[in-house]
Image (spheres, rainbow, N blue to C red):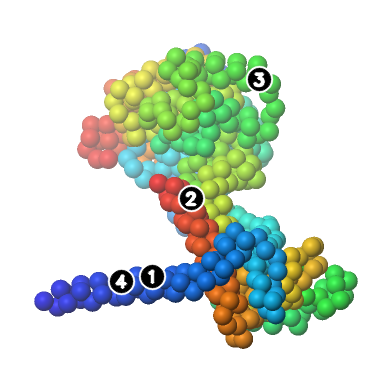
């Protein structure tokens, strides 16, 4: 049963998920377990194409964040969590790569804005470089900070308070700063874990606009529990339930004609 | 009714403690007045003489001895306490081995001062002699090493607390940017926990300043300003412990004045540490 779903998903992805872009990320039978007998994510396979926004939806506890965090190997910070399967980023299995390199290639934005409180706004943007001991001269630094902050539409708001601490900003600004911090390293992929769940509607709106804008340069995978958000911003959507990838299709198709009964029930609010 | 009675009981107990502390301070101050008025406050703390025959007393050698041994002990304790804090609060947080290490360190805090003194006297002092530090082994270096061991638990257990409360989301943010474990500690954990760690070392310094028994047994008890680490000396606490029994008159007053100085010094140090911690916890 599972296998049939998976093959179906992959067959679909080739025809409909990739309007005209190349394959960037391939998940092959990815499973994540917190304890040996219980899998939080079970045999998920999916292809993700560049310059798309892919939303991962599902009720809480369905494993959507767990799947996202498997991609940049965040689970390795916790010794009990095991990831199996293959995760190919530009054809290379991230599970065989140096984790530091993987994490530089796949930036991450978290649920709650988490700028480094001891660093200034300027240093927060450059944190990826300082943390990796990449030396830059003043001019390069200024340039990266300005272009990145312009990219997340924060430059005009903070250009006169570069030396202030990141925590001085509002929640929405902090989250855009965190996006800038992730983008400063020019990653291949941006992973977002419910990035607007701690924000007010106006800030949420700005982040959503930003995501649509960033799509031109980056590939984004975003976890969201907000269906209308997924509908607004994503090209393709995954629906996960109890650790399984139930359906993966173009967002338009999933929201109008879902293939699976469970997806339909979730989207119409029957559960979740 | 019972509630009210209990309330008054608690209130009474608190008042008693306040009265007692007030009484101790009063006793210290009133007995010190004699020496301060006789020599003058600044003369007393600047004079190096300690002469019972001619009734001339000065506190400088002991203030110097106290500062030197305590600061040296702090210096020796930093690398060890810091390593333990990182081990327990960061690398092995929440694991069995961290629990074992922290209970052993706590055990160290429970060892009576006199036992440390004995160990220093019979075990470490001969080592000092063998190393050729000085003829008998006594002195500032020996006391500082033993003091350092004594204050490690205080510094490390508090620092561990501060390091382990660094929010996970900040560490994850750093890891997600490709940082290594060491980088996360250097650029996230330590800056975040920094003032707390600083405060715990200040508190440990406060402990070292007042420590009496072990130092009295190991420092050599000579009334001079120590010229180097191998030299013998006395601390404010050790001179009091050594001489209070046979002191009277002006000498007794000098010893009590020294006790007052020590009390004020440790109180200030503790207040500074508490203040920093309060700022951190905000």
**Which residue carries the number 1 mark?**
B22
**Which residue carries the number 2 mark?**
B276
Gap in Å between the C-alphas at discs 2 and 3? 34 Å
Q: Observer-nearest residue: A147 or B128?
A: B128
Gap in Å between the C-alphas at discs 1 and 3? 59 Å
Instruction: Quadrant for residue B223, please give it.
Output: bottom right
- Report whether mark 1 lies on the same chain as mark 4: yes
- Work out whether B125 lies above or below A150: below
Gap in Å between the C-alphas at discs 1 and 4? 12 Å
Q: Position of residue B146 (x, y in %)?
A: 69, 71
- Report whether mark 1 lies on the same chain as mark 3: no
N-terminal label among 1 and 4:
4
Chain to which the residue tagged by mark 4 belongs: B
Position of residue A109 in the picture relative to residue A123 (left or right): left
**Which residue carries the number 3 mark?**
A138
Chain to which the residue tagged by mark 2 belongs: B
**Which residue carries the number 4 mark?**
B14
Q: Position of residue A56 (x, y in %)?
A: 40, 32
- Determine whether the residue tagged by mark 2 lies in a helix, strand or loop: helix
- Report whether mark 1 lies on the same chain as mark 2: yes
Q: Position of residue B184 (x, y in %)?
A: 60, 43
- Determine whether the residue tagged by mark 1 lies in a helix, strand or loop: helix
* Residue at 76% over, 83% down: B122
């Amino acid at each position: 049963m599972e296998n049939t779903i998976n093959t179906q998903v992959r067959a679909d992805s080739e025809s409909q998920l990739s309007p005209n872009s190349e394959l960037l990320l391939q998940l092959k039978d990815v499973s994540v377990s917190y304890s040996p007998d219980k899998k939080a994510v079970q045999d998920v396979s999916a292809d993700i194409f560049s310059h798309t926004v892919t939303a991962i939806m599902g009720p809480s506890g369905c494993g959507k964040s767990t799947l996202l965090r498997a991609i940049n190997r965040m689970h390795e910070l916790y010794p009990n969590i095991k990831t199996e399967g293959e995760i190919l980023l530009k054809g290379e299995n991230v599970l065989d790569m140096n984790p530091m390199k993987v994490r530089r290639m796949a930036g991450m934005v978290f649920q709650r804005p988490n700028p480094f409180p001891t660093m200034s706004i300027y240093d927060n943007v450059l944190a990826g470089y300082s943390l990796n001991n990449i030396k830059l001269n003043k001019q390069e630094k200024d340039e990266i900070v300005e272009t990145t902050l312009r990219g997340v539409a924060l430059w005009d708001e903070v250009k006169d308070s570069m030396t202030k601490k990141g925590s001085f900003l509002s929640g929405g600004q902090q989250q855009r700063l965190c996006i800038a911090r992730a983008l400063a390293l020019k990653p291949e992929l941006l992973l977002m874990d419910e990035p607007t769940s701690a924000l007010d509607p106006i800030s949420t709106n700005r982040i959503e606009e930003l995501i649509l804008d960033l799509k031109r340069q980056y590939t984004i995978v975003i976890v969201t529990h907000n269906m209308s958000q997924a509908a607004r911003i994503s090209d393709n959507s995954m629906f996960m339930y109890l650790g399984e990838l139930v359906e993966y299709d173009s967002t338009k198709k999933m929201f109008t004609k879902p293939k699976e009964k469970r997806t339909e029930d979730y989207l119409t609010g029957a559960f979740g | 009714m019972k509630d009210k009675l209990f309330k008054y009981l608690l209130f009474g107990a608190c008042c008693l403690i306040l009265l007692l502390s007030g009484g101790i301070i009063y006793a210290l101050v009133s007995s010190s007045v004699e020496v301060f008025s006789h020599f003058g406050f600044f003369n007393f703390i600047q004079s190096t003489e300690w002469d019972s025959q001619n009734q001339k007393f000065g506190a400088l050698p002991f203030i110097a001895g106290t500062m030197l041994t305590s600061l040296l002990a702090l210096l020796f304790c930093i690398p060890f306490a810091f390593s333990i804090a990182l081990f327990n609060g960061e690398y092995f947080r929440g694991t069995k081995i961290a629990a074992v290490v922290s209970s052993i360190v706590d055990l160290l805090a429970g060892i009576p001062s006199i036992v440390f003194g004995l160990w220093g006297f019979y075990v470490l002092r001969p080592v000092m002699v063998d190393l050729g530090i000085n003829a008998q082994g006594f002195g500032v270096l020996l006391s500082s090493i033993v003091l350092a061991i004594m204050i490690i638990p205080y510094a490390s257990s508090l620092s561990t607390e501060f390091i382990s409360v660094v929010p996970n989301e900040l560490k994850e943010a750093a890891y997600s940017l490709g940082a290594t474990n060491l980088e996360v500690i250097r650029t996230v954990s330590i800056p975040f926990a920094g003032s707390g760690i600083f405060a715990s070392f200040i508190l440990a310094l406060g402990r070292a300043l007042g420590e009496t028994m072990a130092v009295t047994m190991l420092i050599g008890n000579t009334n001079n300003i120590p010229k180097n680490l191998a030299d013998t000396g006395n601390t404010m606490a050790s001179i009091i412990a050594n001489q209070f029994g046979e002191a009277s008159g002006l000498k007794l007053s000098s010893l009590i004045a020294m006790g007052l100085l020590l009390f004020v010094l440790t109180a200030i140090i503790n207040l500074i540490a508490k203040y920093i911690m309060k700022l951190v916890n905000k």
